[in-house]
Image (cartoon, grey):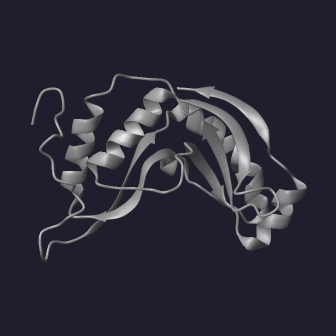
């Protein structure tokens, strides 16, 4: 390893030793409590129609989607090493919307501004974990999952509006 690139000699952690136990892990950013409370309040009206709200303790911004890793300790260590290369930066939640589209809503999410710092962190983590994703990075915070039975309610009550929450 070098001081400029602490991961230069790192091996992707998703290659466990033969017979090692697998752990389902992901890398994400915790959202501050004040922002979480605001987001949970916004999503609460969907609860009446059967939407599954993400618990306040589970609200986060995913940077690396879930995968099976060789162990949690090595995943945490990799996260620590990569994160140490980055300075603090702001997250701005800028838009509330149903996804993938209003006609067939499956999720309610708060879209996050894709700042250069956030994109660089996400790319560094994907590389460190040996992960690839063909989809473009769309930083967001999922607030609710909308089952089939609740989609008509969501279509009748669009929640497509700007947000201005920063941490």
Q: Is residue 29 left or right of residue 37?
A: left
Residue drawn where x is 29% and y is 34% of the image: 83
Q: In terms of depth relative to the viewer, which is nearer, 117 or 79?
A: 117
70 vs 139: above or below: below
Residue drawn where x is 18% and y is 40% of the image: 7
Q: Count of labels shown? A: 0
40 vs 92: above or below: below
Q: Residue furthest front?
A: 134
Give the percent coordinates (x, y) of residue 152.
Answer: 85, 65
Q: Is residue 83 left or right of residue 98?
A: left
Q: In terms of depth relative to the viewer, which is nearer, 45 or 122?
A: 122
What is the quadrant of residue 28 in the picture? top left
Residue drawn where x is 15% and y is 72% of the image: 20
Looking at the rendering, in which quadrant would you find the N terminus?
top left
Q: Residue furthest right?
A: 156
50 vs 62: above or below: below
Give the percent coordinates (x, y) of residue 156.
Answer: 90, 57
What is the quadrant of residue 125 in the picture? top left
Q: Residue furthest bottom?
A: 19
What is the quadrant of residue 107 in the picture? bottom right
Give the percent coordinates (x, y) of residue 44.
Answer: 72, 49
Residue drawn where x is 27% and y is 43% of the image: 79
Give the percent coordinates (x, y) of residue 141.
Answer: 57, 45
Q: Is residue 35 left or right of residue 108?
A: left
Q: In terms of depth relative to the viewer, which is nearer, 11 or 42?
A: 11
């Amino acid at each position: 390893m070098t001081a400029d690139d602490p991961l230069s000699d790192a091996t992707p952690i998703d290659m466990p030793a033969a017979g090692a136990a697998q752990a389902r892990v992901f890398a994400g950013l915790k959202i501050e409590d004040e922002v979480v409370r605001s987001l949970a309040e916004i999503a609460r009206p969907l609860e009446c129609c059967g939407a599954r709200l993400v618990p306040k303790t589970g609200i986060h911004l995913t940077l690396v989607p879930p995968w099976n890793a060789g162990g949690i300790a090595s995943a945490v260590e990799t996260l620590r090493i990569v994160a140490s290369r980055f300075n603090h930066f702001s997250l701005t939640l800028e838009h509330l919307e149903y996804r993938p589209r209003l006609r067939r809503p499956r999720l309610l999410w708060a879209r996050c501004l894709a700042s250069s710092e956030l994109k660089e962190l996400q790319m560094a983590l994907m590389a460190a974990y040996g992960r690839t994703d063909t989809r473009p990075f769309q930083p967001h915070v999922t607030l609710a999952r909308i089952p089939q039975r609740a989609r008509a309610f969501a279509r009748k009550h669009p929640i497509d509006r700007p947000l201005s929450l920063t941490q």
